[in-house]
Structure formats: structure tokens, C-alpha cells
Amino acid sequence: MPNIMRQLLKISVFVMLLGAVSCRELPDYLMGDDVIARVGGELLTVQDISAVVPSNLKGDDSLSFVKQYTDKWLVRQLKVNEADELFSGTEKDIEKLVEDYRQTLLTSKVDQYYIDQQMSDDVSQEDITEYYNTHKSQFLLDRTLVKGRILRFDATYRQSTKLKTQMQKAATSQNDDKAFSDLCAKNNFLLIDNRSEWVNFADFLSNLPIPQSQNNEPLLDKMGVQELKIGSDRYYFDFTSVCRKGNVAPLEIVSDNIRRILITQRRSQIIKSHEEQILKSALEDGDAKVYKNMTGIMDNEQTNKK
């Protein structure tokens, strides 16, 4: 006897013992060796269990799985029976809901079939840029974004004036930028460089000793390196780019969102094209026919209601 069959026999015996109370109610001639549990006339069999037991489960793990599955099956069947009693008067409504759900599942599978056949998730940067340029009103910022740098160093540092000049030069020259970064690292200065990515203005300011409750927008109007001195610390900071709340968001911020929009549009177009094609073919071939002019029917309905 194959191992799987031995395992299933052990499982069936185990679960049948667990459900012995309910099984006793069945006449012997209705109880086959493969029946594990029942609710009314519904039976759970070894074959049903074998189709769902993971192949990698062994010993106690497999028995535990079957016990849990059987319990869930019993509860589900009992709920179905209870629903039949509670909602017997609305059986037609339930059947309609079930049929609607079935049709929705089937039509969704058809849609997905054609999407899988025709869909490409490749979206070019040109497509993204074109959509961005023609739909900018959709991408207005609800917060201010900035790019910039913050440098914190000891207020007793004697060459602070030279350091400020170096920071200014670093904004325009790669060589000066590297020299400035090396200097900060050598002296263990804290350098936060957000020039390559947009960050929330509030998040940028959180690295400075500035109260968030006050209006800090005027800081954005100042050019060049600004400075603060709090206790034993001194700060230099600047903004290399600013995009204020209410302005159009930078393209790099919304590129991923636009990519999702374009993919969704492609999916919708594939579905729409297929629907138009099958409707046109069915009407031409006589497989489908519209017998009444719905516009006239609706006009008559509106007239009768007046």
C-alpha cells in the first residue's frame, strides 16, 4: 500500500474517532470507510481531504491539519443549514446573488485572460512625461518639498567662515563638493545631504533647532547658506530646490503614480476593445439581438410617471 494511502487511512480513522458522536447517527449501510464527517446529507470523505492536505505534512502535523479542516467544514455546513432555515423566504434573492457573483467571477477571468495575452507593463519615460505635461492639474502638492543640506559642527570651530565658503562652493563644483564632504568627515561634522531627493519641508527642519509651530516659510525665500547657533552647536543649511504647497509636484515625485495610471488605462482599454469586438461580432452573426429601442422605452416610462 502506498505511503500516501496509509497516511490517509490513519487520518480518516483519527478524524472519525473525533467525530464519533455525529457519525453514530448515520445508518451503517450509508457509512463507507472513506467517510470522515457529515452534516445532514453532506459528507466529507477521505478523497475530499486528500485533495487539500499539503504533501509536506507528516505525522502529527498532518493529523492536526485534518482536524482543523474538518472542524471548519462542519461549521461551514452547519451555517449553510442555518441560513436555509433563517432565510428560506429570500431564497430567490440569495440565488440571484450567487449567480451574479458567479458571472462576475467568470467575466473577470475572461478579462484577465485577454489582459495576460496583450498587456505589457513596460511604460516609457516619454509616456510618463507626456501624461504629466497634459495632466499637471492632477498633481498639485499638499505640502512643501525641498532639496538641500544641513551641516552641524562645534561652535568653537575656528575656521567657520572658511567652512561656510567651502559649503557655498560645493554647490557648484564636484571637486569642491568632494573636498567639502571629506573635510566634514575628517572633523566628524554632521552633514545631512538631501540634494538628490525631495523631502518634506517639515522633515528637513526637524534636523534643525527650529520650533515647528512657528511660520518657517520665510526661510525658503533666502538665498545661499543660512546659519543658526544654539548652545555649543552651530548650523549651516541651504535649499538647492524648493517646490511649495499648491504648486505642481515635480515629475520625479509622481512618476510611479503616473506609471500605475497608465497601466490601469491600458488594462481598461484591452477590456473595452474586447467587449466592443465580441458585441459587434455577436450582433452581426445573429448570436445576439436587441429587440427594442431602449431610448423610446425610457421616454415612455418617464411620460407615464408624470
Image (cartoon, grey):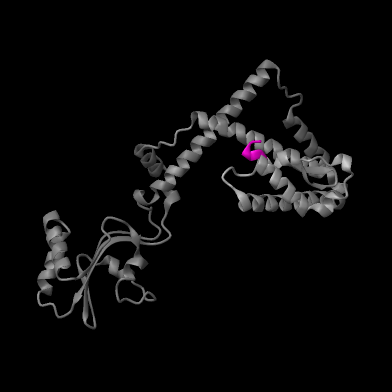
Residue 207 sits in quarter? bottom left
Q: Residue at x 59, y 47 (%)?
A: 57
Q: Please state which of residues 104 and 201 is positioned toward the viewer in this rendering.
A: 104
Q: Does the magenta-highlighted stretch encompass residue 3?
A: yes
Please tell me which residue lies in front, 81 or 64: 64
Q: Position of residue 299 (x, y in %)?
A: 76, 35
Using the image as rendered, state which of residue 303 and residue 182 is in the foreground: 182
- Which percent across, then down, holds residue 122? 40, 36
Q: Going by the image, does 28 lie left or right of 66? A: right
Q: Quadrant of residue 143?
A: bottom left
Q: Quadrant of the N terminus?
A: top right
At x 59% / y 24%, what residue is drawn? 277
Residue 254 located left or right of residue 297: left
**Is the stretch drawn in magenta largely helix, strand or loop?**
helix
Q: Is residue 289 above or below residue 262?
A: above
* Left or right position of 278 against 125: right
Q: Which residue is pictured at 37% across the width and 74% down the height?
A: 212
- 156 horizontally vs 106: left or right: left
State the quadrant of the C terminus: top right
- Residue 282 percent coordinates (x, y): 66, 21
Residue 19 among those drawn in magenta? no
Q: What residue sits 35% from the left and 37% below the top?
A: 126
Q: Which of the 4 quarters of the picture holds residue 242?
A: bottom left
Magenta stretch, residue numbers: 1-5
**How many numbered discs?**
0
- Residue 258 placed where, x, y %? 43, 45
